[in-house]
Image: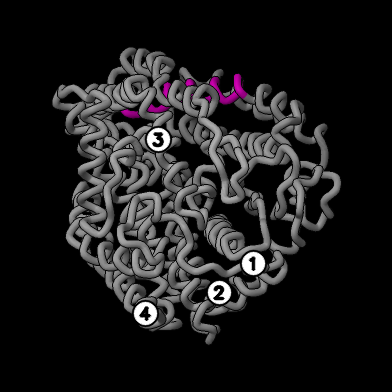
Amino acid sequence: MTFMKTLKREEIDDKYKWKLEHIFKNLDEWEKAREKSQELVEELNAKKDSIFDSPASLLSFLKLTDDFDLIFGKVASYAHLKGDENTKDSKPQELKQKLQSIGRSYSVLYSVFKTSLLSLEEEKLESFFKEEKGLLFYKKFIDQLFRSKPHTLSPEEEYIIAQASRLNSAGKTYNAFTNADLVFPTVKDEKGEEIQLTQSNYTKLMESKDRSVRENVFKEFYSVFKQYENTLAATFSGSLEKDTFYSQIRKYNSSLEKSLFADNVPLDVYNNLIKTVENNVPLMEKYLELRKKMLGVDELHMYDLYTPLVNLDMEIPYEQAFETVKKALAVFGDEYISELEETYNGGWIDVYPNDGKKPGAYKSGTYGVRPYILLNHKDNLNSMFTLCHELGHSQHSVYSQANNPMLYAQYSIFTAEVASTVNEVLLMRYLLKNTNDKKMKQYLLTYFIEQFRSTLFRQTMFAAYEQITHEKAENGQPLTAEILSEIYYNLNKKYYGDAVVHDEEIAMEWSRIPHFYNAFYVYKYATGFSAAISLSKQILEEGEPAVERYLNFLKSGGRDYPIELLKGAGVDMSTTQPIEDALEVFGGLIEELESLI
């Protein structure tokens, strides 16, 4: 089913649309649940001054928060998913607006609870656990909160900090400026036709077979960012200053330490990633030399990195894509496949693009409801991998919810990316194993190798950039546009080596990365990718023992911190070994591709 044009939602067969009635049958049901969540907030508010009067009052308050989280999660999820079906529809926006005051009220209540809890004498809390056995269920949750005690201020100071968060506008300003105000010039496509350059079509144009198109688009695109470099430097510096402010006021040694704290990730994990990848730049240079050879160019430029090395049009209908994914993941056993089929057949996936639908793909859900998956399927290889990726996230939640109470079912982004990427790697290995066509193998290998370049190397380079710029901000050093560009340009030279011409325009790339406004997030893509490469290798080589470890990892949800959960699965991210293993696989793939040329 290939759409030549974007259809209206009502024109798409219902079997390709998710069924939100799994959450609420109609808006009346949703409204009743919303009213119930409002009542629970009011009930919690009435109890806020007596939470710690007795063990029974604490238990009662905690149970009420569970009740609220369950119901509010469903009403919020419904409104969010409904809105993404058609972003032009104002009705879902009205639903979201109805929830805003409830969400704010609960956040204030939770903040009061947390600061009051952390000001409590630990002896008193221990006596509560002894007197009321029902509180033992919450002990791990409370112990985790107590980790943040050294970084928590007085209730009055916490209130001021909470109010000050309204001033954190750097990210909002950046998004508004780059998404709405930046105007790009028109450029010529492969047919010589003038088209409007946008952030949305930039990557597609950089995949053009026509090198002159790529070069022109590359230069025109970055010239716009260069034109506003001082404004963009000011917004990014504002974000860095915000991170520095919060880390210092909460008595962390650095912004990085603060960011890693919630997941209890040692600083060595971050530093080991950067050090290990930087030590293996010769592998990247080897790949880039091969890319240069396959493209038949004398010099490889930055605008040559996105164009496909092998041209192969693969039409893979959605149904075929799912069957292929199923075969690739059969190693996980009948129960896993049965759960996949329920997600596929039960109205949990919104498959095709429609007018107004949110672009991209994601897994979303809330406790007590099977996860939903949003796709914009295009019947090609990339869409099949996207389906496989999102099913990995979905299965993680299915297994986590089935084996954990709500309080401990939510897992970290650090581990989430592992589950999705393991699926992708197993699919790639399955496809490579089951084709004898030379061109197809070349196509698949270049696709896989590009994942290493874009995820392991590129995201680690981003992580290094964040670390350097934050350290300079913490030391009070100026971060002008010139300095920010110089840092980025030097890192680009370090990570891509001597095999590519480092065009001066690439120095401005820092200014178009929105993730930089969510500090120290991108490293999780690289660590998750490394862990997934290692785990998938174990699954294919060891079989059942590795599969059992992996499924137990999915079942564990958020019972422990990410590093410990991954150790149980068979990967120790506190060492460099998983990253070295991934880089070894990268090297092997390059050699395999080289042998086919």
Local SS, label 1? helix
Q: Is residue 380 left or right of residue 508?
A: right
Q: Position of residue 121 (x, y in %)?
A: 27, 28
Numbered badge on residue 329 = 2
Give the alpha-carbon distance from disc 4 to disc 1, as whole Å: 32 Å
The picture quadrant where one finds residue 260 is top left
Amino acid type, label 1:
Leu
Amino acid type, label 4:
Glu
Q: Which residue position is annotated with label 1?
A: 340
Amino acid type, label 2:
Leu
Q: Which residue position is annotated with label 3?
A: 222
Using a 10 Å C-alpha cutoff, classify the residue at mark 2 as few (fewer than 14 neighbours), some (14 to 19) or many (20 or more): many
- Residue 363 appears in the rendering: no
Relative to 77, does residue 549 appear above or below in the rendering?
Answer: below
Q: Which residue position is annotated with label 4?
A: 592
Local SS, label 4? helix
Give the alpha-carbon distance from disc 3 to disc 2, as whole Å: 41 Å
Q: Position of residue 334 (x, y in %)?
A: 61, 78
